[in-house]
Amino acid sequence: MVIPVHDVNPVRRTPFVTYALIAANFLVFLATPGVAGSVTGESGLAQLCHLQAFLDQWAAVPREMIHLQTPTVVPTGDVAVGPQGPGCVVGPPDYDKSPPLSVFTAMFLHGSWLHLLGNMLFLLIFGNNIEDRLGHVRYLLFYVACGYAAAYAYALANDTSGDPLIGASGAIAGVLGAYLVLYPKARVWVLVPFLIFLPLRLPAWLVLGFWFGLQAVYSSGAGVSAAGTVAYVAHVVGFVAGMLLAWPLRRGTPPPPEPRRLLWGRQARPRHSWGSG
């Protein structure tokens, strides 16, 4: 697996929406009970009960999304001691939950620091160029649309599941798909783990194509021991949705200028320049 750290693809406007999305994800994460205080997301029983109640209210649940039915009994966030030992208290919900709206709120929830930082790294590197091409409002609508497409695809494939679906991965996968369509030749600095982290500058089509291939393989259950813990199907569908939405724009997108520094052992010569469109 390669880790992207920077792309050689300048923008013409400040990516305010991308920065706002990243800030919102961090703020929601810090407000999520029992998660932000630990690198792994592990915590005590009281915090886990609070977290479970929080997720039942704000996370997307495939069974609820498809059948539009919410449970009549949910965790309250309290802890009680019974004959079988301590556990989370359940009771009628004191809120009205909208399953379609929960898909939106779930895009800002993450289960651990690793989950959050990984998603935000990809959004920071690739989101600014898609926002630059689409404009602020269209980019935000695009981001949300990809997130919804990814979440509902996963829900359709797991319509009886009561496990919460959280994370911005589906929406960010759409950003990656759009980047592959619009800027396939842009250069991306990546770290490749090979004894040490080896820095390489690779074309975007190779980096993102490799990422998509892994998600497609993992979504079939191959190569992973616990595929059910990650919504790989959502990643695949979000990526494809981003490609399809960006496809009509590919002809009007100026390619990024070639880097002037050494590229694959030779001096790269600039062949393109930015236009005014």
Image (cartoon, helix red, strand yellow):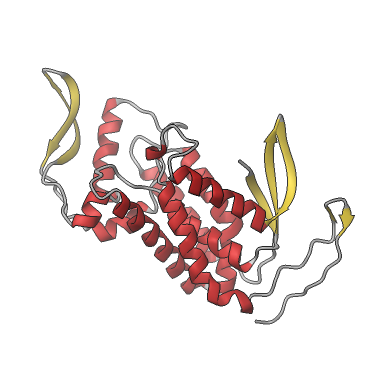
Splitting the image into 4 quarters, where does residue 126 fall? bottom right
Query: Total of numbered circles in the picture?
Result: 0
Which residue: 35% across, 56% down?
153
Give residue 132's position: percent from left, percent from top. 59, 70
Tell me if residue 168 can be seen.
Answer: no
- Pick the residue in front: 41 or 260: 260
At a point 19% along the width and 56% down the height, the residue shown is: 67
Residue at x 11% of width, y 17% of height:
83
Given residues 198 and 21, the one toward you in this image is: 198
Tell whether 205 sits left or right of 266: left
Q: Nearer the viewer, residue 34 or 75?
A: 75
Image quadrant containing the N terminus: top right
Residue 155: image location, x then y, percent: 30, 52
Q: In the rendered image of this protein, does residue 231 appear above or below residue 78?
A: below
Determine if residue 37 is in view: yes
Q: Where is 263 relative to 252, above or below?
A: above
Q: Position of residue 88 (x, y in %)?
A: 19, 30
Query: Split into 4 quadrants, where in the image is the C terminus?
Result: bottom right
Residue sitting at the far bottom: 276
Q: What is the residue that sits farthest to the right in this orientation?
A: 267
Which residue sits at x=85%, y=61%? 268
**In terms of depth relative to the viewer, which is nearer, 97 or 179?**
179
Say whether residue 10 is left or right of residue 115.
right
In the picture, measured across the screen, residue 167 lies left or right of residue 197, that is left
Residue 259 x, y percent position in the rendering: 80, 61
